[in-house]
Each structure stands twice: as C-alpha cells, then as structure tokens.
Amino acid sequence: MRFEITLPLTHRFNDHSRITFSLEDGQKPIIFEEGIHYLDGENGAGKSTFLSILSLLSGSVGKAAGDESGKIKYGREAYADQKFDYLKAAEIRENDFCIFSQDVFFLPGLTIKENYRILNRMNDAGGFPSDKYASSLSGGEQQERFIRILLQENKKVWFLDEPFNNLDQRNRQRFWELLKTSYSESPKIIFLIDHGMSNIAENNEHFILYTSLRVSSQNREDDPAFLKIYSIQEPIKFLEGLAVGTKKHPN
C-alpha cells in the first residue's frame, strides 16, 4: 500500500477559511510508502491538518473544496478528489487506519477492557488488564491504556499526532518499545508528529528530508509557513534507540 498525493492540496474549513499545501516547483505527486514519515514545522504549519486530511478525520477536500484542489490516492482508491466516495472512505479508515490524535477517546459507559475488545474486534479481551472505566483514570493513565489498545491493532497505516501528551518517561519508552515490536512483526506506513524531535531532525542520520510543502491560508498569503517531511532511515534501529530512553535519540 502507498499514498500518492497530487499537489496543490486544498482543505476547506468553511466558506471563508481554507488551507493549501503546495510545492515550490508546481503540481506533482508526492508518494509515501512503508516506513516512518516525520512531520516538522512551526506552530501553524498545518501538521495536524495535513494528517487529518490523509486520515479522513477532517474536512472538505476534493470536490467540496473546489476545482483544482488536489487529490489523495491510497492504494487504488482516490478517496479525496472530484468523485469522493464517503462510504468507501469510511471503509478504508475502518479497515486500514490506526489513528492516534491528541485527544484520547473511549466508548462511553464501557470499561477499558470492553473498549479493547470492541476496537480490536475480539470476542474475548484475554489478559488485557483493566476493568476500570476511563472516567476513573487520570489523563496519563487514559493515554497509556489507549496506546496499548491501538498498538495491538494490525492496521496498515498509523497516524500518530503528538502521542506523548500526559505520558511520563517510563511510558514513553514503553510506547516506543511496543511500536518497535509491532513494526518488526508487520511493517507499516507511519506518520508521526512529535515536537520533542524537532531539534534533532536536521542533524540526525536517521532523518532524511523528503520534501518541504508550502502552507498558505487567508491569514498567511504573504508569509507562508513550511511543512518539512522527513523519511526515517533504518526505522527499527531508530525505534530501538527511542525505546532505550527518549533522551537518548539515535545518532
């Protein structure tokens, strides 16, 4: 599986607000295949919006955003273009996408274990160790259990938008260890946003700049932001380094 994105790509929030991602040298596709892709940019550079567009969590793209608004193709399906198929898009997201946004969500009225069973389509939650309700847990505890649920989903594409909110050092390392194990067993397409890595991306051998997108909106026509996208080299080695300790990034 792979993503093929034809730029410029426009996302419309409402009748008066939109954001456009484009390349300096004009319209051409960019491609994301198996591996880890790190998104970096200042606040307002559209990192979370870009992931929301790809993962179908946000917006009006394709026909709803107007002509010449770009196209997103996943596998053989162009799910954001002039012939947008909402049912097909929902099916792709349900079957193939694991989405970890900045806000943790549990199905209300169910225990953590029941959420695990339903979200992973299991009749039995096995040894999953929590019979508590999410409302009885702290923000960090909720996020830790949510991560454990998601990392056991065998999905082809993962969207990780600031996965470390509320997590302590031990659980951050645990996250990377679980992600490394899952990736080793079944390589995936992973999109990652993490402000903590921003200061090492330009000088670390694992980060190779793939492309830089110009990000413009009504408020920034004359002063566009730029979204840098890095491809992570040797992803398993990279994840192993992070699992040792988030202060010991691979170099």
Image (cartoon, rainbow, N blue to C red):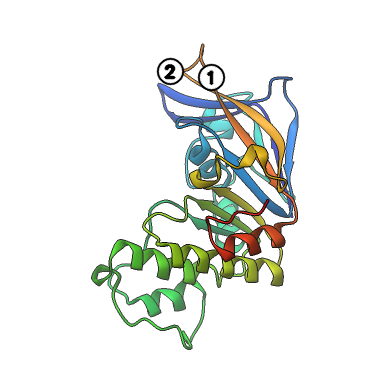
* 218 to the left or right of 24: left
Whether residue 99 is visible, yes or no, is yes
What is the number of the mark on residue 32?
Answer: none
Q: Nearer the viewer, mark 2 or mark 1?
A: 1
Whether residue 77 is visible, yes or no, is no
> Number of marks in the image?
2
Q: Secondary structure at mark 1?
A: loop
- At horizontal 51% and vertical 44% (from top left) the residue drawn is 52
What percent of the width, then of the height, locates residue 9?
61, 30
What is the number of the mark on residue 219?
Answer: 2
- At horizontal 37% and vertical 60% (from top left) the residue drawn is 105
Quarter of the image with the N terminus is bottom right
* Residue type marked 2: Asn
- At horizontal 33% and vertical 77% (from top left) the residue drawn is 111
Distance (Cα) linking label 2 and label 1: 9 Å
* Residue type marked 1: Pro
Q: Is residue 41 above or below residue 123?
A: above
What percent of the width, then of the height, locates residue 93?
56, 56
What percent of the width, then of the height, locates residue 159?
56, 53
Which residue is more in the foreground, 162 or 128? 162
Q: Secondary structure at mark 2?
A: loop
Packing grade of label 2 (10 A; few <14, some 14-19, many >=20) is few
What is the number of the mark on residue 224?
Answer: 1
